[in-house]
Image: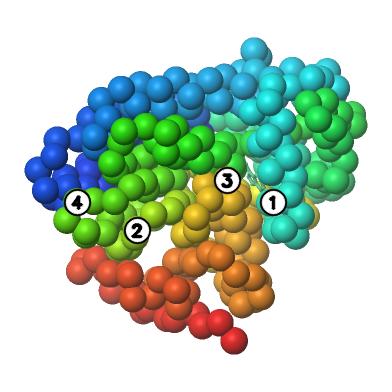
Amino acid sequence: MRKSTKSALCAAIIIMLFALSACGGTKPESSSFQAMDTLMTLTVYGDEEIGAEIKEEILSLDRALDATDENSEIHHLNTEKSAAVSEDTADLLNRSLQLCGDLDGFFDITVYPAVTAWGFTTGEYRVPSDSELKTLADHIDYTAVKLSDNGVRIPDGVMLDLGAVAKGYAADRSIELLNNSKAQAAVLNLGGTIGLFGKKPDGSRFKVGIADPENPAGYFGYLSCDLGIVATSGGYERYFERDGKRYIHILDPATAKPADNHIASFTIVTDNGAKADAMSTALFVMGLDKATDYYRTHDGFDCVILTDDGSLYITEGIYDDFTLDSGHRYTVNRINKP
Ligand code: ADP
Ligand code: MG
């Protein structure tokens, strides 16, 4: 994950400003650190110690889940094909496999060999041949992952990648820690996956900026939110170009090729971090039409979709909570439930 540190920092600053003004002068504890290959910023009101605990929790998850780290549980599993994993990792694998099914395989945690083949793990980018892609796509299959209690088995040729859910899961774990703390309110910016916690004394809502794909240090709009998670997936932060074509790090599990469907960014608002993170990746891959159908046939989440022709699509549950930044001239469309 080679996230733009600048944009993550800027996001953190804007969110902090809103949080600050909304908490009637109570001074927040704020800290930033690198984890999961991105910048994370925690802003907590009412508890001076919990920030350090959250940081430890996230760093420990990162050590277990990073497939590129030779010492991680996922790396061990990917090389040995069978291993006992920690309770946290088993819990996340269990939830991830459920999400793969719920999201009709558009989210698939076995994309790792394909992600590696394109060079996204090393930065040594290449375009695999058609026959290589066919073999890679044949090995993307979350149903091949066998999980029983803490034991995991995967077949040869299959490798796990939890990169599309790890930050969302980290947000869930952090919010659990906040629930058991003195903290009154918190804004967690985990590299673009935003977790909101608590109640502000003045009753005002959190305001979350959504990164502008043209200039990820800025925002194209803002969402007013209470609790929950706001997760955005985009093709603008990790990609490479060959012969005038852009290849992004979000892959279509059916083809092992980067998603190429005119989506510029896909934001999900829901109550759970792992779900929000997996969904933003999966619905990005689905594209506008399939994602709209998915919204109309499933409950419990809302979306802000930006297409590369500058059209915005906002689902009805958050339509009135969205404010377009004054510098952007996108056409705004509303998606309704049937
Ligand atoms: P980011 O991690 O940059 O915020 P995402 O949450 O969308 O972005 O996750 C993208 C990462 O997840 C990729 O770098 C890759 O490791 C992995 N990935 C890519 N495509 C998929 C997919 N369709 N399903 C599951 N994981 C994916
Ligand atoms: Mg994701």
Q: Tags 3 and 1 in contact by the CB under 8 Å rule?
A: yes
Q: Residue lying furthest left in this view? A: 25
Give the alpha-carbon distance from disc 3 to disc 1, as whole Å.
9 Å
Give the alpha-carbon distance from disc 3 to disc 2, as whole Å.
18 Å
Q: Nearer the viewer, residue 124 or 286?
A: 286
Q: Can you give x and y, in whole percent of width and height, for residue 98 in the image?
A: 73, 49
**Crowdedness near tag 2: few (<14), some (14–19) or many (≥20) residues, C-alpha within 10 Å:** some
Question: Is residue 337 left or right of 316 when viewed as pictured?
Answer: right
Q: Amino acid at mark 3?
A: Ala
Residue drawn at (29%, 43%), measured in percent from left and top? 185
- Checking the image for residue 201, the label placed there is 4
The earlier-in-sequence mark between 2 and 4 is 4
The kind of secondary structure element at disc 3 is helix
Q: Can you give x and y, in whole percent of width and height, for residue 17 in the image?
A: 17, 46
Mark 1 C-beta closer than 8 Å to ligand 1:
no
- Checking the image for residue 226, the label placed there is 2
Q: Amino acid at mark 2?
A: Asp
